[in-house]
Amino acid sequence: MGQDQTKQQIEKGLHLYQSNQTEKALRVWMRVLEKSADPAGRFRVLGCLITAHAEMGRYKDMLKFAVVQIDTARELEDPDYLTESYLNLARSNEKLCEFQKTISYCKTCLNMQGTTVSLQLNGQVSLSMGNAFLGLSTFQKALECFEKALRYAHNNDDKMLECRVCCSLGNFYAQIKDYEKALFFPCKAAELVNDYGKGWSLKYRAMSQYHMAVAYRKLGRLADAMDRCEESMKIALQHGDRPLQALCLLCFADIHRSRKDVQLGLLKLHCLCERIYRTKGQQQELRDHVVKFHECVEEMELYCGMCGESIGEKNNQLQALPCSHFFHLKCLQTNGTRGCPNCRRLSVKPGYV
């Protein structure tokens, strides 16, 4: 495969990836990697594979391609390629929580200054180093790196980098328990996504929403936290991003623990997953969550004693009776009885839920 054909196939993969046909895009790029004789094209397609696996949360695969990319960069003997490949190696180790290795690779990048491209990457290097210091709880160094990355973003008008830094700052301030700032920065990231992110990966929106959810929960604004976490979870499920799914599940658990309604949290999660998998046409996953949803309904006795349909899946007006049984209001009105259809006790002074 020559240079022109390599370029065409890479672009084909990018089009598929941007159309949310991730697996097809990966297959196209893997064929390029196997057949292309163009080292620069191989370097570029490795970059695409690294980014795609990062966004899907497949960090071990991300690291595998980063190692291959650095060998390709050495073959090309180009300092720009080498700097970029060391950055990808740093980011891969950061995602795998190998924070000391991340810092070491970032320092290597910073020592390779001198070309325009290398200087442009310094903001991303500073961000990755800041995330590593934060992972090591070295807060002062982490903040210094984030501030440096933010200056690079502003100086180069790099809105995508600014968005990523704001998400990291949200995480930073959440860890040191300044929850107002922990909310401010991901809100700023969400604004950047809305204003400039039309062609960006949905991962940026998902991460801003997740960090907003964490801050809202810490501030006790549980309804807002739930809305933001649901939005992040939808995107994580669409992309197959399992690490972000796990973070969202933890956030859901914290929200419902604060509300003391853990079972309702599981119910809402299965209902959300059911809607998403139904839209995507993934029948096996859909069936699994339908079964789990109804198991929760049975366990919690969340169904109308008259029509048998579940309660809590849709917005419906309910009527609670003094005996603690509750029903769809329309079912009781249709039935016309004054007694509880379940226990036959007379219903006096019914309340509304």
Image (tube, rainbow, N blue to C red):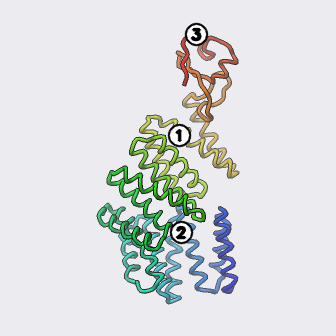
Q: Which amino acid does label 1 sit on?
A: Leu
Residue behind mark 2: 61
Image vertical order of residue 217 relative to residue 121, above or below:
above
> Does residue 207 show up?
no
Provide residue 168's location: percent of width, then percent of height.
Answer: 41, 61
For mark 1, give the secondary structure.
Answer: helix
The percent coordinates of residue 214 (x first, y second) are 43, 49
Q: How crowded is mark 2: few (under 14 residues within 10 Å), some or many (20 or more)?
A: some
The answer to whether mark 2 and mark 1 are in CB contact below 8 A is: no
* Vertical side of 198 occupied by 267: above or below: above
**Image disc number at residue 346:** 3
- First-in-chain label (2 vs 1): 2
Query: Image quadrant of residue 17?
Result: bottom right
| C-alpha distance separating marks 3 and 1 | 33 Å
Q: In which quarter of the image is residue 93?
A: bottom left
State whether residue 173 appears in this view: yes
Position of 106 with respect to 296 (left or right) is: left
Q: Where is residue 340? Give x, y as percent.
A: 60, 14
First of labels 3, 2 by sequence position: 2
Q: Which of marks 3 and 1 is in front?
A: 3
In the figure, is residue 270 to the left or right of 158?
right
- Please report the residue visible at 61 percent of the width from the left and 17 percent of the height from the top: 342
Which secondary structure lies at badge 2? helix
| Front position in the image: 52 or 191 | 191
Query: What mark, if any, has residue 169 been given in the picture?
Result: none
Question: Left or right of 22: which side holds 135?
Answer: left
For the point 63% across and 16% down, the residue is 341
Q: Which residue is drawn at 50% across and 75% down?
A: 66
Foreground label between 2 and 1: 1
Disc 3 vs disc 2: which is toward the camera? 3
Q: Residues within 10 Å of mark 1 (few under 14, many from 20)?
A: some
